[in-house]
Image (cartoon, rainbow, N blue to C red):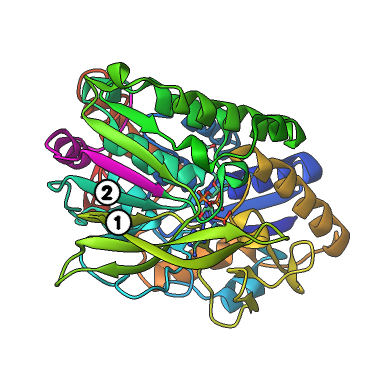
Amino acid sequence: MRHIAIIGSGPAGYYTAEAAQKKFGDDVAIDILDRLPVPFGLIRFGVAPDHQSIKAVSRRYEKVALTDNVRFVGNVSVGKDVSIEELQGLYDAVVLATGAPNDRELTIDGAELAGVYGSAAFVGWYNGHPDFKDLNPPLDGKDVVVIGNGNVALDVARILSKTCSEFEGSDIVAHALETIAASKIENITFLGRRGPHQIAMTPKELGELGRLEKACPRVDMGDFPPEGDDAMLEPGMRKAVTHLREFGGITESHRVDKKIDINFDFFASPLTINGDGKVESVTVEKTRLDQDLRSQGTGETYDIKASLVVSCIGYQTPPIEGVPYEHGRGRFANDEGRILPGLYCVGWARRGPSGTIGTNRPDGYAIVDLLAEDMSASATKNGRAGLDDILASRHVNVVTFRDWKKIEEAEHANARDGSPREKFVDIEAMIAASQI
Ligand code: NAP
């Protein structure tokens, strides 16, 4: 029997488990550990609550989770309840599938002011992550600045712009829905430090911005290269830029009923965030592209009002003591997923925060190919029996997949009309529901 521990129950974790089942059949026991009592990581806490079709992929992970040789070991914090070294002693392979839940740091003056958030916290707040349930962001001002031109920036702007009826069918948590419904927002400004041809937004998600009930995107066509240059873009990017050009054609009469303006400020890099105790404005430096398409400051600045700033400039994997880490890239130092003998990483923890959910599937299969090369068939490790002994001796309240199904059932029962679930946002409430 081969024993594999996977740390993290998000997409990379479950695709790795699926691949290991396929590769080793009955000759493997896989434990998926998560510090939270609920599985699926990014699917539950990262994917936007109004993108339920993307979240539906968790059904595929559930099939894996419900097989005999895979176990969910929830509410277990690696580094606190059990150490990496202990896991390495118990399992033939330990795979870090910890994702990239920490923000890439915004290092400008004023980033520490009240009202400035990283996207991890902000997205976590509207998705009911227990760590961010009390964030209480100020949505009572008129002006929001969203830093970044990626899909997370798009998610944040769209969620802030929707009406209650547009959230029908979503699982946005009640505290966020109430705050957004009462919001006074009138302007949302994306700051993109490069131009329309350098956005990291994908066409489907960008297109949604043009179909909002009470918000309308606005671009300055002066920021665009000649239309003929779009032909040089790869097809997805060309489609995205076509959406941007369409936004440029929106007439003022179409905007009359739209309370919220969503502005794209291109060639705009945040220089400082200003305010007395809390954010009041952002000083922006105009940029231009150099030969390598990197942004360069021009020295020309302007200020925009801001009562809320959300920095959506990417994520990083939290380091783990004793595990080699690549600080510049915010991920574990690894060679194709190998970190140290018996220790691997996969998904965002391996390659950094890029790609779609589906990108993690080939990643999971590739790491299992490496495990198969490295692991001897006559393994004699203690595996889950050893883990159970350690956790019992430390009185850790483990949440199993069966327990999670009880939490899920209670979340379904608590759902408001038209919503699939009302998530528990407290760990204690999750555990209480699991014990009914
Ligand atoms: P991202 O795609 O890497 O975008 C980050 C953005 O931040 C880029 O526009 C980048 O500009 C900008 N940026 C980085 N550092 C900056 C700085 N110091 N100052 C100003 N701007 C800065 O990251 P993300 O939006 O967090 O998304 C992470 C991954 O999840 C991506 O692969 C994304 O596609 C995926 N995702 C997908 C969906 C979906 O499919 N629905 C939803 C959410 C996220 P530069 O290009 O100039 O560096």
> Which amino acid type corresponds to the residue marked 2 in the rendered image?
Val
Residue matched to label 2: 144
Residue 33 shows up from this direction = yes
Mark 1 and mark 2: Cα distance apart in space:
6 Å
Residue matched to label 1: 309
Q: Residue furthest bottom?
A: 322
- In this view, the residue in front, 130 or 102, is 102
Q: Which residues are magenta?
A: 170-190
Q: Residue furthest right?
A: 373
List x then y, in percent, for residue 406: 33, 36
Height in image: 249 above or below 358? above
| Secondary element type, mark 1 | strand
Which of the marked residues, 1 or 2, is nearer the chain's N terminus? 2
Residue 53 shows up from this direction = no
Height in image: 430 above or below 169? below
Find out whether the residues at labels 1 and 2 contact each other: C-beta distance under 8 Å: yes
> Which amino acid type corresponds to the residue marked 1 in the rendered image?
Val
Residue at x-position 22% and y-position 48%: 143
Height in image: 268 above or below 319? above
Question: Based on the displayed image, in which of its 4 quarters is residue 99 positioned?
Answer: bottom right
Height in image: 434 above or below 137? above
Label 2 neighbour load within 10 Å: few <14, some 14-19, many 20+: many
Which label number is shown at residue 66? Answer: none
List x then y, in percent, for residue 436: 24, 40
178 in the magenta segment: yes
- In this view, the residue in front, 268 or 399, is 268
Residue at x-position 58% and y-position 31%: 240
Residue at x-position 37% and y-position 65%: 396
